Amino acid sequence: MSKFLVYIDQNIIGAQMEGILNLSKRPDLYWVYSKRHFAEFRSSSKSNQYLSALEKIDAKLLDIELTSDWKITGNAKLIERGTPTQHYEAYIEATRETIACDNIFDPLLAWVNGGGDEGIFRELPLRVAEQVTSLTKELPINCNALLDQLKPNFENMIEQMIEKRNEVKKTEKVFGGRPTIGAVSGENQIYQIWKMISPATPGITCDQFFGFDPLDKLGHEIFPLYLGIIGCCSVMDFLGFQAEKKCRKINKIPNIRGDAEHIAMGSFCTAILSEDKRLIKRAKAIYEYKGISTLPILIERPANPSLKPIAAPGDVPT
């Protein structure tokens, strides 16, 4: 019989590391993590402790399956060989040259969400050009001519966006407003939101609006559900559904992106565990809408963390 896969959010690993949770290796399931965790480990001074916590519970790496031309297949693969430390070291080596690319468009995302810094936003075309030049310096091609053509158009687009301002509240009002959408509860929450906003979005479907069926499928014949979930989370941030003001702060954008990727990776598993109420509520809404069987489980810390550690969750399906 195959084992159940239980995806653990970054905060669950932290609670395990601190001794607040008491997860352990189990014969009926694998605790699993993804490379998104590695991106979060890299920005922390406790990466070795996080890796040690994963190794103690014999956690396994779950990775997105890609085709030979780097397209997402729609499946994930469980990597049972190798330790978390070995996989992390391989990840660091593989992404050493691209680390600066991870957050390059965060100023744009923050601006679209009604925040950000105008000066940093204006610098985006230059930063993108510098990054492309750096990444292609070893290739037998010269991208400078192409960049020189594209840069003025990029700069013009940003100036137009700045001129129109990012008064997101006016746009939100068209879709019903953050307070109304943020208060949605009960069953079929995405459908409830769609009923509110569909009069303002004629000619498109619910799947298209929430990012599951975009016009640009990035070369995929069928848009991967994994990418659709990440896109849906971006729409939810904008609408204010289980979102926070942090989505308007540039330095918080990586956290927002990380939550979306964790929810997307959790869709391949039996359950997903997190201490983040907003993440769990958002995961429930998305999984219900797309008919995904993953069970989102909220883990709450005891009022007094010095008390007896929480045992491995009993409501994980067995």
Image: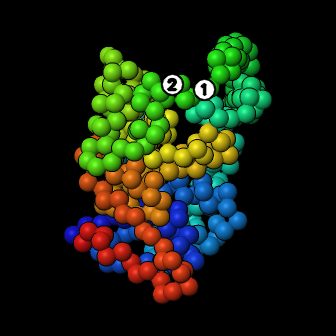
Inspect the image, locate mark 2, and give the three-letter code of the amino acid beneath it. Thr
Inspect the image, locate mark 1, and give the three-letter code of the amino acid beneath it. Glu
- Left or right: 48, with 294 as reference point: right
Residue 318 visible in the snapshot: yes
Q: Quadrant of the N terminus?
A: bottom left
Residue 137 visible in the snapshot: no
Real-space Cα separation, disc 2 to disc 1, in angstroms: 7 Å
Does 15 appear above or below 154?
Answer: below
Q: Quadrant of the C terminus?
A: bottom left
User: What percent of the width, then of the height, locates residue 193?
Assistant: 34, 36
Residue nearer the viewer, 177 or 27: 177
Which residue is label 2 attached to? 171
Residue nearer the viewer, 316 or 188: 188
Q: Residue at x 36, y 44 (%)?
A: 184
- Left or right: 231, with 96 as reference point: left
- Left or right: 83, with 265 as reference point: right
Which residue is label 1 attached to? 167
Secondary element at tag 2: helix
Does 1 appear above or below 19?
Answer: above
User: What percent of the width, then of the height, locates residue 316?
Assistant: 30, 70
Q: Residue at x 61, y 50 (%)?
A: 94
Q: Determine whether label 2 and label 1 are within 8 Å by CB.
A: yes
Q: Within the image, what quadrant is residue 214 found in?
A: top left
10 Å crowding of disc 1: few (<14), some (14-19), many (20+): few
- In this view, which residue lies farthest toward the bottom? 308
Q: Within the image, what quadrant is residue 149 found in?
A: top right
User: What percent of the width, then of the height, locates residue 307?
Assistant: 51, 86
Secondary element at tag 1: loop
